[in-house]
Image: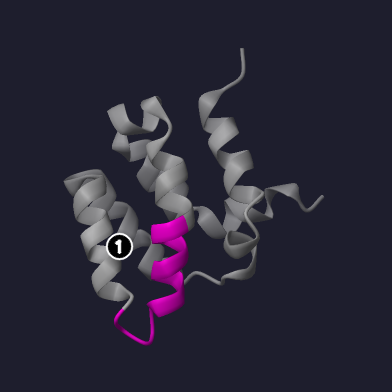
Amino acid sequence: MSDPIEDVLEQLRAKPRVQREHFASNFLHTVGEVLEREGFATTRLFLMDKREQAATRYQARVLLEEVLPVLETCERIRQNRAIGRLIIKSLETVKGGNRR
């Protein structure tokens, strides 16, 4: 039986838009905190707002369109959003996991 979190990480690593985008660590930290505290719907609203700001436009778009949908497919992450927070906060490290 495969680890569902490892499956999520592999899906994220396979997404070209995730690989291309540079994410600011403090932006990822904030998004992760919103996800853990408030849930997926509020995080989507937060990212929709951040898409309107030049400094976070592309990061927010990739998180909204590529990362959140993958996280939401995992029952374990839906039940324990702290795992989703950790994945988001570590996204720059996670996406480099296949470059060995």
**Label tally:** 1
Q: In the image as oriented, which residue stretches furthest toward the bottom?
A: 54
Q: x%, y% of residue 65?
A: 43, 58
The part of the chain drawn in magenta is 52-65
For the stretch drawn in magenta, the main secondary structure is: helix
Q: Which residue is drawn at 30% across and 65% down?
A: 47
**Location of residue 54 with respect to 72 vertically, above or below:** below
Q: x%, y% of residue 6?
A: 59, 32
Category of crowding for the residue at label 1, using alpha-carbon neighbours closer than 10 angstroms: few (below 14), some (14–19), many (at least 20): some
- Quadrant in the picture for residue 93: bottom right
Q: Residue at x 19, y 54 (%)?
A: 42
Question: What colour scheme has been applied to the protein in the rendered image?
Answer: one colour
**Location of residue 30 with respect to 22 vertically, above or below:** above
Q: x%, y% of residue 67?
A: 46, 52
Disc 1 marks a residue whose amino acid type is: Thr
Q: In the image as oriented, which residue stretches furthest toward the top?
A: 1
**Location of residue 35 with respect to 20 vertically, above or below:** above
- Tell me the SS state at disc 1: helix
For the N terminus, the image quarter is top right
**Location of residue 41 with respect to 18 vertically, above or below:** above
- Left-right relation of 98 to 87: right
Q: In the image as oriented, which residue stretches furthest toward the right?
A: 100
Q: x%, y% of residue 68?
A: 40, 50
Q: Mark 1 points at which residue?
A: 30
Q: Residue at x 29, y 74 (%)?
A: 50
Magenta-drawn stretch contains 50: no
Looking at the picture, tell me which residue is in the foreground, 12 or 30. 12
Magenta-drawn stretch contains 60: yes
